[in-house]
Every structure is written in structure tokens, then in C-alpha cells.
Amino acid sequence: MDADLQTRIKDLISSSPVFVFMKGNKLMPQCGFSNNVVQILHSLGIPFETFDVLSDMEIRQGIKDYSNWPTIPQVYVNGEFIGGSDILIEMYNSGELREKLTVALAS
Amino acid sequence: MVQLDHVRSAIQKALPDASVEVEDLTGGGDHLQVKVVSRAFAGLSRVKQHQLVYGALRGELASEAIHALALQTGTPA
């Protein structure tokens, strides 16, 4: 991957403890899977930042290469990729997500 | 769109012991729900488990023949 693109991605991910690459934005998600992630994070009252991959084709492809993960949304916690919509739902239902995010935001 | 049997066999090629259930959520053949159970997932994080399945379907996802894939993975009970 292009070094500039990798730097841009790393800068985005590190700009917030919880960072989401999604289609659309928090107010108007453009895809049901992105909407799932936004609703889950809202329901936990977790502050998070997002990037709309539909606004930037370079990031849209680049983030998939960066994480070796073929789909959007992608959720990063303290720089670590933790999953997409399915994994967030599973972690939310098991209570693991609340625990992980609470710890991440306290550190 | 893809044939559901093709999805199952692509996953089983990568994970020979896997039991695979494929469901077509919309009838259009491109929004799929897949459950995969395999011993190969033992000890792996969820991200790594899903990456194994995505790897088996790399071509279909990249071409957007599969537009959406809801994935559940686990190990045999």
C-alpha cells in the first residue's frame, strides 16, 4: 500500500479511542450494517468518530487492505481492529463490548 | 450473485472439516447469511475466524458477486 495512504489511515484510526469506517455518517448511515454499528455504540453511550468511505475511494479500498477485511463497516478500538457489524452484535449481546469499550475509554 | 452450493464448497475447500449453512436473505443471491463451524477456529479471535472464511470467498467479495455476508463462526460443541 502507498505510504501516504497508510499514514492517512493510521492518523484517522488514532484520532479517537473508538473509530468507525462506515458508509454514510452517524446521522445518515447509508447501509444497514453501518447503521447497526452506529446504533450499538449510541446505545452504550460511547463517544466515537467516523469516516464516510463513500466520500473517498482511496480510503474505501485502502482500509480493506489495511485490515485484510473485505467489508465495511470496520471498528477500531485504541488502534486495534475489533470487527465489523456481525462481531459487534455478538460482542454487544455477550456484554463483552461494553466491558472492552469501558476499559479502552478509561485508559 | 452466486450459487449457494458454490459458497459452501469454496468454504469447505479452505476448511475441509467445516459444517456450513448458507442462507439467501433476499432471494437475490447476493445478500447471504453463512454459519460456519470448524475445529480450525479453535483458539482464534473472532476477527481471525472471519478472516479465514473471507479468505475462502475473496474473489466473490472483491467482485461484489456477494454484496453482503452476515457471518457467524464457531467451533464444534
Image (tube, rainbow, N blue to C red):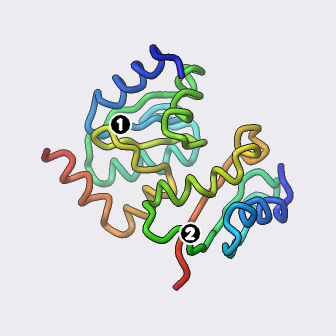
Q: Which mark is residue B40?
A: 2
Give the distance between the C-alpha atoms of the residues marked 1 and 2, in whole angstroms. 30 Å
Please indicate whether residue A69 sits to the left or right of residue A18 in the image: right
Q: Give the number of the mark in front: 1 or 2.
A: 2
Pointer 1 residue: A19
| Quadrant in the picture for residue A50 | top left
Chain letter of mark 1 equals A
Q: Which residue shows up at 82% across the image and 62% down it?
A: B4
Please indicate whether residue B14 sits to the left or right of residue A58 in the image: right
Q: Which residue shows up at 37% across the image and 26% down it?
A: A10
Q: Amino acid at mark 2?
A: Ala
View extreme (left): residue: A106
View extreme (top): residue: A4
Helix, strand or loop at mark 1: strand
B21 w.r.t. B4: above or below: below
Q: Which residue shows up at 54% across the image and 27% down it?
A: A62
In the image, residue B9 lies at what x, y percent? 80, 64
In the image, residue B32 lies at what x, y percent? 71, 58
Q: Amino acid at mark 1?
A: Phe
In the image, residue A5 lies at what x, y percent? 48, 18
Helix, strand or loop at mark 2: helix
On whether disc 1 and disc 2 are found on a single subunit, the reply is: no
Q: Which residue shows up at 76% across the image and 46% down it?
A: B60
